[in-house]
Amino acid sequence: MLPFRFFNVYGPGQRADHAYAAVIPKWISATLAIQPVTIHGDGTQTRDFTYVGTVCDVLTDALLRRVVDPRPVNLAFGSRSSLLDLVQEIETATGLPARREHVPVRVGDVPHSQADSTRLRDLFPEVATAALREGIPATVGWFRQRPTAP
């Protein structure tokens, strides 16, 4: 068995209306519906986003090669994207301006989150991640194909 730690996974199939919905589906849904995207703070905080297709590739490879290790592996690539960059990618992918609504920073929210990907790259040297400019359009496409899309 190989324990994984997931970092900000996003992609097609992720609902925006769930109580624990992540920022990407919430903001895509809001932008498509011409609703404001709520940004806690100034938007310069960063996150290490991981596309769901990459997660599936790594998990499949781990199973097929029977990779085992008792130590956890961060399933992320050590990249950092600001929330402002994320909004811009969503605007590009949707072709719509996002109505940004800045609110106070959430108590306890860390300004920057970035995984150490050393073990992931050692165990899965062939894996490649999708950049936001690739993953966001695929996610927007999924939202637009849903019957409830605006």
Image: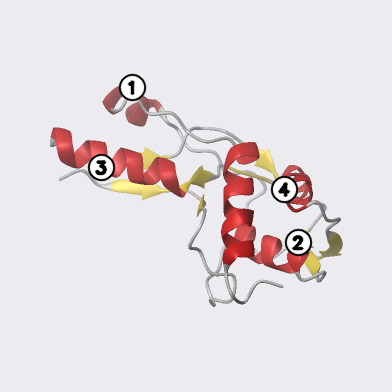
Local secondary structure at mark 2 = strand
- The span from disc 3 to disc 1 (Cα, nearest Å) is 14 Å
Question: Which residue occupies the foreground of this view, 78 or 136?
Answer: 136
* Amino acid type of the residue that numbered disc 2 sits on in the rendered structure: His
Local secondary structure at mark 1 = loop
Tag 3 residue: 60
Q: Residues within 10 Å of mark 4 (few under 14, many from 20)?
A: some
Query: Is residue 149 shown left or right of residue 35?
Result: left
- Quadrant placement of the C terminus: bottom right
Which circle marks residue 40 in the picture? Answer: 2
Q: Residues within 10 Å of mark 3 (few under 14, many from 20)?
A: few
Q: Against 5, is 107 above or below?
A: below
Mark nearer the viewer, 3 or 4: 4
Mark nearer the viewer, 1 or 2: 1
- Residue 35, quarter of the rendered image: bottom right
Residue at 45%, 32% (x, y): give it: 116
Tag 4 residue: 93
Q: Earlier in the sequence, mark 2 or mark 4?
A: 2
Which circle marks residue 125 in the picture? Answer: 1
Q: Earlier in the sequence, mark 3 or mark 2?
A: 2
Q: Position of residue 118 (x, y in %)?
A: 39, 26
Mark nearer the viewer, 3 or 2: 3
Residue at 82%, 69% (x, y): give it: 34
Q: Is residue 38 visible?
A: yes
Q: Against 69, is 10 above or below?
A: below
- The span from disc 2 to disc 4 (Cα, nearest Å) is 22 Å
